[in-house]
Image: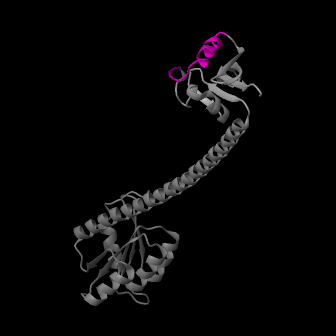
Amino acid sequence: MITETGAKILCVDDESSVLNAIKRIFMDEEYIILTAQSGKEGIDILKVEDPQIIISDYRMPEMNGIDFLRQVREIKPETVRIVLSGYADTASIVEAINEGQIYKFIPKPWNDDELKVTVANAVERYHLYKQNLELTKELQTKNTELKKLNTELQKLLDEKIMHLNFRDEILIKHQNILDALPVGILGIDPNNIAVLTNKKWSEIAGDTLCMLGENIERQIKEPLKSFIEEMKTKKIFSKKTSFGEIKGKLSGRQMDSEEGQQGTIIVFSPEED
């Protein structure tokens, strides 16, 4: 970034005495002063140099200050433009301001101290403008990155939802298969929570029905209660019993899979009539 002391100032005036006077005013400052004696020469300098402040005479031959500053605005719109004029023509001043977007209009002869303050303020204005551009660009970059991140997150979310929907469909199909079996099935996790059952179990269990998600110890009755008690010391166990008038065989197996799934699977197989 150009500091205030390193700012370049392009002064354009067809009178060399004016240019020399401006140089003298800023000789104790650390500005870099560039000079041109016509608008055309000023445009040529503007194409190879990078001044931040433009000080231009209003009335010049061939190309007046309005035309010059209009071109300056097109080439380097970020420059801060100042007009010097010995003519108190209000209409011309308004035209210059509108056409060249002038920061300040200073009459000739000028006050040296006021000109110094005006230039210092112009340099500060330039820096604020550049900082605003940088912040705006940074904000646009972050907004673009955020939009990209949101798009990626939405994609991941859509994939996750699709995966969950697929799992739901698989679970429904699994449950349909379980419900179609001619045996009653009950699954219990290590905390004695009922995690699996099927339609046949509901039909035969009656008042010993175990509700999914609830602790079976508060629900089970005989003969299931004693069977589960015996299962605690056995990996595999089966016995003939009956639920009400339904006779059959209870079979149980302790699960301990490589994936870490644990619990007990109990199957009741009704006797065939």
Q: Is residue 89 visible?
A: no
| Residue 183 vs residue 114, the one in the foreground | 183
Count the labels in the image: 0
In the rendered image, the vertical position of residue 70 relative to residue 270, given as above or below? below
In the rendered image, the vertical position of residue 188 relative to residue 28, given as above or below? above
Q: Residue at x 26, y 66 (%)?
A: 117
Asked if residue 82 lies left or right of residue 261, the reply is left
| Residue 90 vs residue 207, the one in the foreground | 207
Q: Image quadrant of residue 248?
A: top right
- The residue at the far right in this view is 272
Q: Image quadrant of residue 53?
A: bottom left
Q: Is residue 9 magenta?
A: no
Asked if residue 91 lies left or right of residue 136, the reply is left
x, y percentage for residue 79?
Answer: 41, 70
Q: Quarter of the image for the C terminus: give it.
A: top right
Asked if residue 244 lies left or right of residue 146, the reply is right
Q: Quarter of the image for the N terminus: give it.
A: bottom left
Extent of the magenta region: 217-233
Asked if residue 6 lies left or right of residue 157, the reply is left
Q: Is residue 102 visible?
A: yes
x, y percentage for residue 266?
Answer: 67, 23
